[in-house]
């Protein structure tokens, strides 16, 4: 049986400058809200200003696009199987 690969998105919302690039490339998962910053949809705040969400392989591409678009690199992606940081 092949386990579905999982990844963790770690979003440092404190560092977000509201450039909106993430939401422009991935509107399904990122939304700009009232304070001008982005929210990662379906995520949980794990410590002050840090939000996390677990995703599966089919969702990875869209999240990588968002992470790569962010000018201040506040979106991290970790491969939960290897523990390797995929981005940045
Ligand atoms: S691209 Fe980065 S800085 Fe811009 S809104 Fe998204 S998370 Fe914030």
Image (cartoon, rainbow, N blue to C red):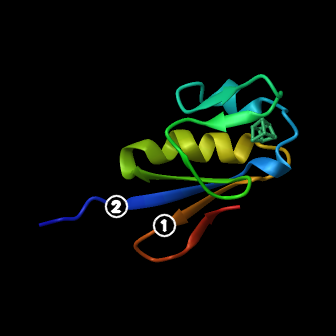
Ligand 1, image quadrant it occupies? top right
Checking the image for residue 5, the label placed there is: 2
User: Please, what secondary structure does the residue beneath circle 2 have?
Assistant: loop
Image quadrant in which you'd find residue 40: top right
Q: How many marks?
A: 2
Relative to 34, residue 81 above or below: below
Residue nearest the viewer, comparing 68 with 76? 76
Query: What whole-number distance in Å separates the C-alpha atoms at marks 2 and 1?
Result: 8 Å
Please state if 86 lies on the left or on the right of 22 as rendered: left
Dot 1: element: strand
Q: Are marks 2 and 1 in contact (CB under 8 Å)?
A: yes
Left or right of residue 74, residue 10 in this image = left
Which residue is tagged 1?
A: 79
**Vertical comparison of 32 with 4: above or below:** above
Question: Can you tell which mark lies on residue 65?
Answer: none
Q: Percent position (x, y) of residue 10?
A: 62, 57
> In the image, what residue occupies the spot 67% across and 47% down?
67
With respect to residue 60, does 80 lie above or below? below
Name which residue lies at 59% across and 47% down.
64
Q: Quadrant of residue 58?
A: top left
Nearer to the camera, 82 or 42: 42
Tell me where residue 65 appears, x and y as whole percent. 62, 41
Where is residue 82 shown, x and y percent of the image?
Answer: 45, 77
Could you tell me which quadrant the N terminus lies in? bottom left
């Amino acid at each position: 049986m092949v386990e579905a690969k999982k990844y963790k998105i770690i979003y440092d919302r404190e560092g977000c400058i509201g450039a909106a690039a993430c939401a422009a490339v991935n509107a399904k998962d990122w939304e700009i809200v009232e304070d001008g910053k982005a929210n990662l949809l379906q995520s949980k705040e794990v410590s002050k200003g840090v939000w996390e969400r677990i995703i599966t392989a089919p969702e990875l591409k869209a999240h990588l696009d968002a992470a790569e678009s962010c000018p201040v690199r506040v979106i991290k992606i970790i491969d939960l199987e290897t523990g390797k940081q995929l981005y940045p």
